[in-house]
């Protein structure tokens, strides 16, 4: 009988250890005032936008995930933001094992691939809501710039986004809902989307987004983060001592100023996912070559030439060679906690 009691106790203790480990592994994500919290501790997003597309392609390919994660960890990155769901558990597992979290973005109309229009996004939420890598669910990316996608009426998007947020809350109370809004949301967006928990904003205000934070403080008590910010490494003109052409110095200088301005206001801002991890050769024309150009809405605020050269935004190039800005990111992200 003593042996049986002893064995039962050992089994029970082992089960409790496993249960506790799994509970901790889930990482409860909450909102407290203006603060994002993970396991009751403040969480500052030191992030990067990520879409690994190889040379010659326009499709995401996660075959480089192991090496990419090593570089991210070296740079002090703790959060990845993706624009479309990753339906590969092994990739999510590896992100978690590297100690990073992920913001999963859902598009409105992605031909039924976990999108908002079809409602299939909620299937993804229910499949992966217990995965410990998940930080936030994100709805849309700068859709406020595109009323033409919503029958010419942006209110149609706001209604769809708020309804999607309600569905997520009903199915997954453990992770907040965000969006990647183009610039500061106006009163219409805020009024129509009360179910958005934390507002992400894609903001390009030259090399200093600092004025944004008091503007946000004046219109909302919710938390916010910068879902995109940064600079590219190509100058279309020579200006302010920066030469035209490939110019890693301009990107490094601008990102230093941008990151310092953001991380100086953590009383308001929950961090940033800097745009972007690697150069994206698929954005301006020929997928086999890197070329200036491309187009992005509201991009006249890109430092220091006012032009978003869409294929030059990586902190590493397409072959994962570190650009000058990598060291800037590493230095700043490792300084803040």
Image: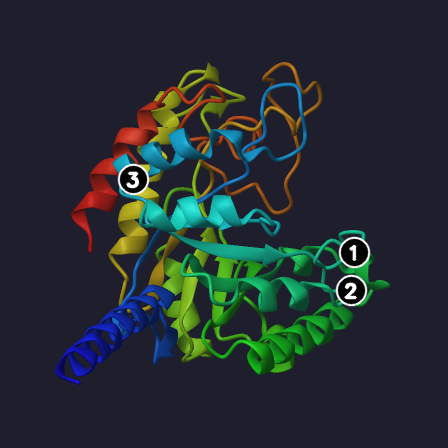
Relative to residue 55, is residue 332 drawn left or right? left
* Crowd rating for badge 2 (residues with CA inside 10 Å; few <14, some 14–19, many 20+): some
Q: Is residue 118 above or below residue 102?
A: below
Distance from Cα at disc 2 to Cα at disc 1: 7 Å
Q: Is residue 314 above or below residue 302?
A: above
* Crowd rating for badge 3 (residues with CA inside 10 Å; few <14, some 14–19, many 20+): some
Identify residue for label 1.
Answer: 112
Q: Which type of secondary structure does the marked residue at label 3 adopt?
A: helix
Q: Mark 2–mark 1 contact, CB under 8 Å?
A: yes
At a point 68% along the width and 30% down the height, the residue shown is 58
Q: Which one is in front, 305 or 267?
A: 267
Q: Which one is in front, 328 or 110?
A: 110
**Of the image marks 3 and 1, the number of the one nearer the N terminus:** 3
At a point 43% along the width and 49% down the height, the residue shown is 93
Q: Which one is in front, 11 or 217?
A: 11
Distance from Cα at disc 3 to Cα at disc 2: 35 Å
Q: Quadrant of residue 283?
A: top right
Q: Which type of secondary structure does the marked residue at label 1 adopt?
A: loop
Distance from Cα at disc 3 to Cα at disc 1: 34 Å
Residue most toward the left? 2
* Crowd rating for badge 1 (residues with CA inside 10 Å; few <14, some 14–19, many 20+): some
Relative to residue 191, is residue 337 drawn left or right? left
Residue most toward the right? 151
Identify residue for label 3.
Answer: 73
Relative to residue 134, is residue 4 drawn left or right? left
Q: Mark 3–mark 2 contact, CB under 8 Å?
A: no
Residue 182 x %, y % = 58, 57
**Of the image marks 2 and 1, the number of the one nearer the N terminus:** 1
Residue 60 x %, y % = 61, 35
On residue 117, which mark appears? 2
Q: Is residue 118 above or below residue 332?
A: below
At a point 17% along the width and 85% down the height, the residue shown is 1
């Amino acid at each position: 009988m003593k042996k049986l009691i002893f064995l039962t106790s050992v089994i029970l203790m082992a089960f409790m250890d496993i249960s506790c480990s799994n509970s901790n592994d889930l990482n409860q994500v909450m909102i407290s005032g203006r603060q994002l919290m993970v396991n009751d501790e403040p969480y500052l997003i030191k992030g990067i936008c990520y879409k690994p597309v190889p040379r010659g392609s326009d499709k995401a390919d996660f075959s480089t995930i192991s090496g990419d994660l090593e570089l991210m960890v070296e740079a002090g990155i703790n959060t990845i933001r993706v624009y479309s769901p990753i339906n590969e558990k092994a990739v999510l597992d590896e992100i978690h094992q590297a100690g990073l979290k992920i913001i999963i973005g859902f598009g409105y109309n992605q031909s039924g691939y976990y999108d908002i229009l079809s409602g299939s996004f909620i299937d993804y939420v229910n499949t992966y809501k217990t995965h410990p890598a998940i930080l936030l669910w994100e709805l849309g990316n700068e859709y406020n710039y595109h009323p033409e996608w919503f029958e010419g009426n942006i209110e149609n998007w706001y209604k769809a986004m708020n309804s999607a947020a309600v569905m997520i809350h009903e199915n997954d109370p453990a992770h907040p809902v965000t969006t990647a809004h183009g610039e500061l949301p106006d009163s219409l967006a805020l009024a129509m989307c009360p179910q958005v928990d934390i507002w992400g904003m894609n903001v390009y205000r030259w090399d200093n987004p600092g004025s944004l934070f008091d503007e946000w403080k004046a219109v909302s008590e919710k938390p916010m983060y910068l879902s995109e910010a940064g600079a590219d490494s190509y100058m279309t003109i020579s200006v302010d001592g920066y030469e035209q052409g490939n110019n890693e110095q301009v990107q490094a200088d601008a990102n230093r100023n941008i990151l310092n301005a953001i991380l100086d206001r953590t009383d308001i801002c929950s961090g940033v996912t800097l745009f972007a991890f690697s150069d994206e050769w698929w954005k301006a024309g020929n997928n086999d070559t890197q070329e200036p150009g491309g187009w992005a809405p509201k991009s006249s605020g890109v430092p220091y030439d006012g032009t978003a050269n869409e294929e030059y935004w990586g902190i590493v190039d397409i072959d994962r060679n570190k650009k000058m800005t990598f060291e800037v990111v590493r230095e700043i992200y490792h300084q803040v906690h």
